[in-house]
Amino acid sequence: MGEGIVLCITEENTLSQLGALLAINETNTGFYRLCLGAYAFERHCKNNLRKTIGYHHGISIRYDNRRGDK
């Protein structure tokens, strides 16, 4: 993953709209890709990283507390 920021969302309403566009197909879980992926969504609060969702080449996501890629 690069270090450049492609998009920064600071308004809660806009973040909620992004969340409404995301969907997870639970029937396609359990596989693993061995790289970190191309991009990541990072959630920060008061300058602290709270959560990272890795985005794997337009195919799947990986995030904490879940087994396998989604």
Image: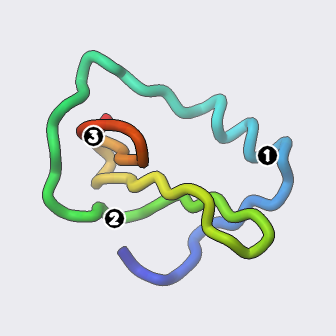
Q: Amino acid at mark 1?
A: Thr
Residue 38 in the image: x percent, y percent?
Answer: 33, 64
Q: Which image quadrant is residue 20 in? A: top right
Res 14 label: 1
Contact between labelled residues 3 and 2, with CB atoms less than 8 Å apart: no
Q: Position of residue 41 (x, y in %)?
A: 53, 57
Q: CA distance from mark 1 to mark 2?
A: 23 Å
| Residue that carries the numbered disc 3 in the rendered image | 69
Q: CA distance from mark 3 to mark 1?
A: 25 Å
**Which residue is nearer to you in this view: 64 or 13?**
64
Q: Who's the residue at 42% across and 47% down the image?
A: 64
Give the residue number, with chain letter if any, for mark 2.
Answer: 38
Earlier along the polypeptide chain: callout 2 or callout 3?
2
Category of crowding for the residue at label 3, using alpha-carbon neighbours closer than 10 angstroms: few (below 14), some (14–19), many (at least 20):
some
**At numbered mark 1, what does the secondary structure look like: helix, strand or loop?**
helix
Give the structural element (helix, strand or loop) at label 3. Answer: loop
Q: Is residue 16 above or below residue 29?
A: below
Q: Callout 2: 10 Å neighbours few (<14), some, many (20+)?
A: few
Residue at position x 74%, y 46% from top?
15
Task: Find residue 68 and name its label.
Answer: none
Amino acid type, residue under disc 3 in the picture: Asp
Indicate which disc, 3 or 1, sits on the residue closer to the N terminus. 1
Circles 3 and 1: CB atoms closer than 8 Å: no
Asked where in the image residue 26 lies, by quadrant, the reply is top left
Considering depth in this image, is 37 or 68 the residue closer to the camera?
A: 68
Picture quarter with the C terminus: top left
Three-letter amino acid code at the position of disc 2: Ala
Query: Within 10 Å of the Cα at label 1, are there few (<14), some (14-19), or many (20+) other Cα atoms?
Result: few
Q: Position of residue 35 (x, y in %)?
A: 19, 63
State if disc 2 and disc 1 touch (CB < 8 Å).
Answer: no
Label 2: element kind: loop
Q: Residue at x 74, y 75 (%)?
A: 47
